């Protein structure tokens, strides 16, 4: 009995972990009771509570946590207990660390992580489960190429304006919610990252803080990337945890928007994904399509290439490896390649909607 009391915390945590794993084994339960229930409430509430603050509370908390952990690590190695054997003390501290990690994992899952196990987009949007052929990829990439060139002239070259972009995204998501009510975006809010240039070196365009419910965008990115990056982060706020899902929802928002900058940004991003997928099967066709991009898009991609080359380095490599492992642990076995899985959903969505010319697609998006 004494031993049970001694390890009561571990037993209780073990039962909670088992319960959590049983819960996520049913995507329908996660979708119904968590994503569209509990998470929807806390996500909207966190935006109402913190959204009006002009800076990221989550970023400040991250900074304090990093400093706290560094100080604890230093104390761990410096602390000595004269006259006492060191191993029992070290074992006790290791157990405390394990306990803390499991608690953080449970809190993370409760506030956000269960979204990784919700029903897939095929179920939500009644899409077929069909892999695109090389011909399909060529057709899809051609469509996004035409859309990119069509909206290039109207894209803004001005400095990123968060307030303006928030209005654009609110309109887009409101329009989309008329067709898909589960995409309603209440208490809209996203913020620019406090990490600034450091975010460039880390290769971070945007991120969602699961503990504060805030979405952050790195406004140091090339300006033409920021509209779609913002739409992607809003999709995370709505519970689309997987990167491919957030890409799809961000793109879907763009076709419900009247803003040329968002449409251009989203279509250029989708063209790059679909054309890269095509390249695996037909590099000649892929290059031909890439060369067909208009002068504006080609100029923007040169800027993007220079941006990547400027900030690539060990920090970016470490961040990529770390995030790859994070994705593996959260039901995304493709790792960083999970972003490009959006091509699969794009194909099945547009195949369902009989993708034809630009006018047909725009009418379907209304």
Image (tube, grey):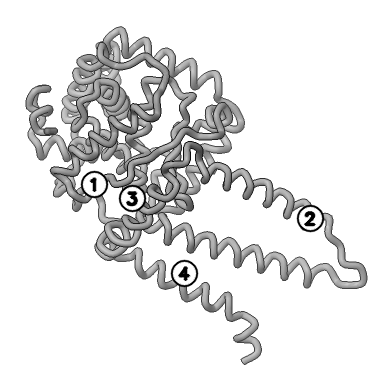
Residue at the spot of label 2:
75
CB under 8 Å between callouts 4 and 2?
A: no
Residue closest to the far top: 295
Mark 2, Cα crowd under 10 Å, few <14 / some 14-19 / many 20+, is few
Residue at the spot of label 1:
184
CB under 8 Å between callouts 4 and 1?
A: no
Q: What's the residue at 47%, 50% (across, down)?
A: 212
Which quadrant is home to the N terminus?
bottom right
Mark 1, Cα crowd under 10 Å, few <14 / some 14-19 / many 20+, is some
Secondary structure, mark 3, is: loop
Q: Is residue 165 above or below residue 12?
A: above
CB under 8 Å between callouts 4 and 3?
A: no
Q: Is residue 274 left or right of residue 320?
A: left
The answer to whether residue 249 shows anywhere in this view is: yes
Secondary structure, mark 4, is: helix
Q: CA distance from mark 2 to mark 3?
A: 38 Å
Looking at the image, is mark 4 or mark 2 earlier in the sequence? Answer: 4
Q: What's the residue at 54%, 31% (across, down)?
A: 199
- Of marks 4 and 2, the one in the foreground: 2
């Amino acid at each position: 009995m004494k031993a049970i009391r001694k390890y009561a915390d571990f037993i209780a945590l073990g039962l909670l972990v088992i319960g959590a794993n049983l819960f996520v084994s049913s995507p329908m339960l996660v979708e119904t009771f968590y994503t569209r229930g509990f998470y929807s409430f806390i996500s909207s509430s966190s935006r109402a509570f913190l959204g009006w603050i002009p800076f990221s509370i989550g970023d400040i908390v991250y900074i304090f946590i990093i400093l706290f952990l560094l100080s604890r690590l230093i104390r761990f190695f410096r602390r000595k207990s004269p006259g006492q054997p060191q191993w029992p003390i070290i074992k006790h501290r290791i157990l405390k660390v394990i306990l803390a990690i499991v608690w953080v994992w449970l809190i993370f899952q409760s506030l956000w992580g269960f979204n990784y196990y919700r029903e897939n987009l095929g179920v939500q949007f009644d899409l077929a489960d069909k892999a695109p052929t090389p011909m399909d990829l060529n057709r899809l990439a051609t469509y996004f190429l035409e859309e990119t060139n069509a909206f290039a002239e109207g894209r803004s070259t001005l400095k990123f304006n968060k307030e303006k972009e928030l209005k654009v995204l609110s309109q887009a998501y409101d329009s989309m919610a008329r067709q898909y009510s589960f995409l309603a975006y209440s208490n809209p809010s996203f913020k620019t990252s406090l990490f600034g240039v450091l975010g460039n070196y880390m290769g971070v365009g945007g991120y969602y803080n699961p503990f504060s419910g805030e979405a952050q965008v790195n406004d140091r990115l090339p300006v033409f990337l920021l509209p779609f990056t913002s739409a992607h982060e809003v999709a995370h706020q709505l519970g689309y945890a997987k990167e491919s899902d957030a890409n799809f929802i961000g793109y879907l928002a763009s076709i419900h928007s009247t803003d040329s900058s968002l449409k251009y940004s989203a279509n250029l991003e989708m063209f790059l994904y679909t054309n890269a997928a095509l390249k695996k099967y037909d590099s000649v066709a892929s290059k031909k399509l890439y060369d067909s991009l208009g002068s504006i898009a080609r100029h923007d991609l040169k800027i993007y290439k220079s941006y990547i080359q400027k900030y690539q380095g060990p920090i970016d490599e470490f961040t990529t490896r770390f995030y790859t492992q994070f994705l593996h642990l959260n039901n995304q076995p493709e790792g960083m390649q999970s972003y490009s899985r959006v091509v699969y959903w794009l194909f099945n969505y547009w195949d369902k909607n009989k993708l034809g010319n630009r006018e047909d697609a725009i009418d379907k998006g209304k």
